Amino acid sequence: MATETVAKPRTSVRVGVQKFGTFLSGMIMPNIGAFIAWGLITALFIEKGWIPVPQLGGFGTNAEGVANVGLVGPMITYLLPLLIAYTGGRMVYDVRGGVVGAIGTMGVIVGAGIPMFIGAMIMGPLGGWTMKKIDSLWDGKIRPGFEMLVNNFSAGIWGGLLAMLGFYGISPLVTAFSTAAGNVVQFLVSNGLLPLTSIFIEPAKVLFLNNAINHGVLTPLGIQQSLEQGKSILFLLEANPGPGFGILLAYMFFGRGAAKASAPGAAIIHFFGGIHEIYFPYVLMRPLLILAAIAGGMTGIATLSITNSGLVAPSAPGSILAVLAQTARDSYLGVILAVLLATAVSFVVASVILKTTKHSDETDLTEATSRMEAMKGKKSSVASTLTGAGAGGGVGTAVLAGPVRNIVFACDAGMGSSAMGASVLRNKIKAAGFPEVKVTNAAIANLSDTYDVVITHQDLTERAKPATSSAVHYSVDNFMSSPRYDEIVELVKKSNAPETSDAGAAAGHGAHAADTPVDSAPGGTAPGDAGTTAPAAVVPSEILVADSVILNGTATTRDAAIDEAGRLLLARGAVDEGYIAAMHEREESVSTYMGSYLAIPHGTNAAKDHIRKSAVSVIRYPEGIDWNGKEVKFVVGVAGINNEHLHILSSIAKVFTNKAQVAQLEAATSVDEVLELFGKVNA
């Protein structure tokens, strides 16, 4: 069984600052590509660049004596701030908010006359939020046919007003703030105090507060400094990979247990991948190691100050490759020294700390990773590298950073076994009193890293892991009655209970008890029922009909049974010959045996083009068939377009999770009894 560590939700000033920093980061990070493009153009084409080109670098004059504008100035003055503003506005109010936010930012840009990144981070969200509020005033009150007129003119008028507000009101304030912040930085540099910023920056990184500092202040000020001087030290105050790399090297030599074993992989991800959060749990295991990070950070900054080195643009992520790509032409020696010396100092300090403190890495690493994800407020995409999430053939050790909300059952096609498994698990979770937990099914090719729990057939788990690395993975070989389902229900209870009040929990259990008979506890509502008690449902005649039900199949082998089920679908005009071949292909890759004497052969994900309409066939084999070593008495052929077949699959799942109803199927003497049984389970 998995070992899941659940981080309880926390509310604090730190969390508020984190959210603010995340919001700022959300405006900057999607546009990092534009920053990199500007940095490369600057490094290559300005007068002091590697390949000086007046027309691109913006220096000198053309043949008519007119000064060259170039790309560097317009990109940093207009393009980058407008991209940030649009992104911020869109985060608040979709495209409409992004457009209005960008219009308002133009006023700040022209009014200030300098790159307005902070102004863009103010005006973008402000434009989106105010436009949203204005639209709410006449929501539902516009006469039909006038919507486009009102929407376009309201956005244009309000955007124009915001541009004037930005020009006369916001730009002077932001200019004053930028000047004051720049003076503070210059004071620190002039007095040799800049290395002291590591005292705040390094702990902030481990606490996930760095985004507010880095993207809220350092990047805008660094851009301004880079424009004036061709480079900025501010870009490396937080992005230097040296301090974290030194700590991980110390664990490689002097750590023990899981921490030492995982440190080499973490070091590679940190140094070359630029994912700094991977070393945070190692610091949380030994809080004194923050001193190593601070010492390394101070050493790196001092080296940059002494050598007058810097980057031309932000380095994101903080990979050594990205750092070198953005290094100014005259700063390679200083930047490389800053990284190496930061690594060395951090390594020495961390080694002393590790050698003089007690070791309990085997248990501490998982706990520290959990604390790290709790502080981050969500699961880490690299946590599985530290904890071995999903390792092994069963279920892996993983860390949940909050309650379970999203569970997906994935298979190759996402329409047969996964739908059945999802239906069974959904009903179990609802029966446990957690109807708010979403259980869906999907094709492995369509998975994304947005799920809390991923369930797959044991032969498909390795395929699902890369796309869902931060999820808890469960492998099953019996889709109808796998013991893993009970483990998942316990996981849901454990992770979701703290957020559920006693009264709410009692209400949830009581309501479910009122709607669900005791003998059908594994059952529940079908997909789309939304937990309501519906009238007696009838199986849709267009999906399962009497002609597609055979009570005594003639096949004696697995492949023959697949052919027999496929021929019934073909006779209905639901599929073509290619789909039957795909059913065999699917069976060869992953078995469709579900448990409880049931198999549901269906095509691969690539075979959906061979489906003409949704249909299901049901064949009973009273003597049983050997299905890869499992006994199968019922074969259900499935062909589904979109989600039309999920209703009947849910009904089938309910039947086969109830032993009494399976016995009824075995004893049925007519096709009508089978159809009636599948209809009654939805009552």
Image (spheres, helix red, strand yellow):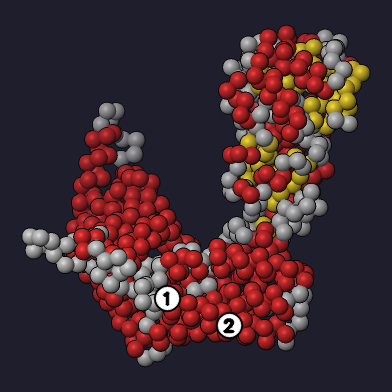
Mark 2 or mark 1, whichever is nearer to me: 1
Q: From the viewer's side, name the closer residue of 193 and 533.
A: 193
Q: Amino acid at mark 1?
A: Tyr
Q: Position of residue 290 (x, y in %)?
A: 59, 80
- Whether residue 482 sits left or right of residue 383 in the image: it is right
Q: In front here: 127 or 621?
A: 621
Question: Residue 344, which numbered label?
Answer: 2
Who's the residue at 51% across and 77% down the image?
339
**View extreme (bottom): residue:** 191
Q: Residues within 10 Å of mark 1 (few under 14, many from 20)?
A: some
What's the amino acid at mark 2? Ala
Report crowding for label 2: few under 14, some 14 to 19, many 20 or more residues within 10 A (C-alpha).
Answer: many
Give the x, y percent position of residue 396. Answer: 75, 54
Question: Alpha carbon of mark 2 to alpha carbon of mark 1: how far?
Answer: 18 Å
Taking the image as drawn, is residue 234 in sight? no
The front one of 380 and 587 is 587
Asked if residue 435 lies left or right of residue 225, the reply is right
Asked whether, in this view, residue 64 is left or right of residue 82, the answer is left
Q: Earlier in the sequence, mark 2 or mark 1?
A: 1
Residue 585 vs 78, above or below: the answer is above
Q: Is residue 563 visible?
A: yes
Residue 524 image point, x, y percent: 72, 33
Q: Which mark is residue 332?
A: 1
Which residue corresponds to the image point at 29% horizontal and 76% vertical from the top-left? 229
**On screen, 628 above or below 448?**
above
Residue under the image location 35 percent in, 45 percent down: 95
Residue contact between numbered discs 2 and 1, judged by CB atoms under 8 Å = no
Say left or right for 303 vs 575: left
